[in-house]
């Protein structure tokens, strides 16, 4: 199966762009903010929360970084105006992290302040290992300055994650998707799972609010056990899933009384996002292809 997954990835550049768009439409809201708002409204109607992400982390100049920040201000305004139950998730590279530290901080502070004024929340996504230290430093700095409507992401497959946990009071915990060398990241499937469980247990023990971001049924079951054993109130944690992935399981979690948030990406860079994510995770490419084939033959 791994060979088939990699073969699918190699074929991606040859797939016509309209075909990629159609195939990825289940996992991306669309190119516009209106598309994202429509999806969030539908999710809210089913009792689900949302986090909106503006696609476009590969900025090349300060104007592009400020434009991405401007789009997040637009997202916050629409969430506020339409009374949606949603927050935002952003990547620091999209705000200029690789261009200038001061530029990135300026953009981030402005977005966080706007969110706070509207009673909303900002999640800083984690990217590849070259940005981990700077991401955590900026998060800790803003949090120490009183920005308490701010959270960060940790990736369980990184060997350093256990040492990064202390002092973080709002964390999305996921497995991790970027390709990293074995000296930095666990490669074995069960080792990643074990790290996820240890990290979740530590976060719960230290009183952090945690977003449990996984589609892995074994980890969902382990997470339910940890939450139950700790006697956590439902306001102290939430499950998180990607748009279009295991929606039936998400419905079951909501029906079980758990908070469930769906990651809703949108933007004009949908093609780059789709191809890059599938290239970074060949197994996901295989899963998407299998899902598509299943839907076609199902009809």
Image: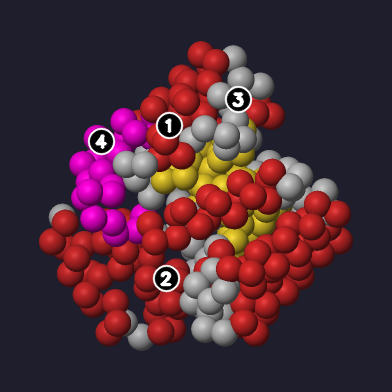
Q: Spatial distance from mark 1 to mark 2, Cα to Cα?
A: 29 Å
Chain-order first, disc 2 or disc 4: 4
Task: Assign a secondary structure to mark 3.
Answer: loop
**Labels 4 & 1 near each other (Cβ < 8 A):** no
Work out how far the residue at label 2 is from the one at label 4, CA to CA, in angstroms: 27 Å
> Is tag 4's residue or tag 1's residue first in the polypeptide sequence?
4
Q: Earlier in the sequence, mark 2 or mark 3?
A: 3
Q: Look at mark 2 in the image and give the residue it sits on.
A: 274
Disc marking residue 207? 3
| Numbered range of the magenta stretch | 177-197
- Residue at label 4? 191
Q: Earlier in the sequence, mark 1 or mark 2?
A: 1
**Residue 46 numbered tag:** none
Cα gap from disc 2 to disc 3, whole angstroms: 35 Å
Check residue 183 for magenta coloring: yes
The alpha-carbon separation of the residues under discs 4 and 1 comes to: 12 Å
- Between disc 2 and disc 3, the foreground one is 3
| Mark 2 and mark 3 residues within 8 Å of each other at the beta carbon | no
Going from N to C along the chain, the mark reached first, 4 or 3, is 4
> Which image quadrant for residue 6?
bottom left
Q: Quadrant of the C terminus?
A: bottom left
The quarter of the picture where the N terminus appears is bottom left
- Mark 1 highlights which residue? 199
- At horizontal 53% and vertical 76% (from top left) the residue drawn is 99
**How far from the left and from the top, in percent, is residue 9?**
25, 70
Distance from Cα at disc 4 to Cα at disc 3: 24 Å
């Amino acid at each position: 199966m791994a060979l088939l997954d990699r073969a699918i990835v190699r074929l991606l550049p040859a797939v016509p762009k309209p075909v990629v768009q159609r195939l990825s439409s289940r996992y991306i809201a669309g190119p516009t903010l209106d598309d994202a708002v429509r999806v969030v409204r539908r999710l809210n109607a089913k009792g689900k929360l949302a986090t909106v992400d503006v696609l476009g982390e590969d900025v090349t100049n300060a104007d592009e970084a400020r434009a991405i920040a401007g789009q997040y201000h637009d997202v916050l305004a629409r969430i506020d105006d339409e009374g949606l139950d949603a927050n935002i998730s952003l990547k620091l590279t999209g705000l200029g992290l690789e261009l200038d530290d001061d530029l990135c901080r300026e953009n981030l502070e402005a977005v966080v302040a706007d969110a706070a004024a509207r009673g909303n929340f900002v999640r800083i996504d984690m990217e590849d290992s070259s940005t981990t230290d700077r991401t955590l430093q900026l998060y800790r700095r803003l949090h120490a300055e009183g920005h308490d409507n701010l959270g960060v992401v940790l990736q369980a497959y990184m060997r350093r994650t256990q040492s990064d946990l202390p002092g973080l009071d709002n964390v999305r915990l996921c497995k991790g998707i970027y390709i990293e060398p074995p000296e930095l990241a666990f490669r074995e499937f069960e080792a990643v799972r074990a790290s996820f469980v240890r990290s979740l247990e530590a976060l719960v023990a230290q009183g952090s609010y945690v977003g449990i971001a996984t589609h892995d049924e074994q980890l969902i079951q382990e997470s339910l056990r940890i939450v139950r054993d700790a006697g956590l109130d439902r306001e102290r944690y939430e499950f998180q899933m990607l748009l279009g992935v295991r929606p039936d399981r998400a419905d079951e979690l909501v029906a079980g009384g758990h908070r469930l948030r769906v990651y809703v990406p949108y933007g004009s860079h949908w093609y780059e996002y789709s191809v890059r994510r599938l290239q970074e995770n060949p197994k996901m490419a295989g899963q998407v292809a299998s899902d598509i084939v299943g839907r076609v033959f199902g009809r």
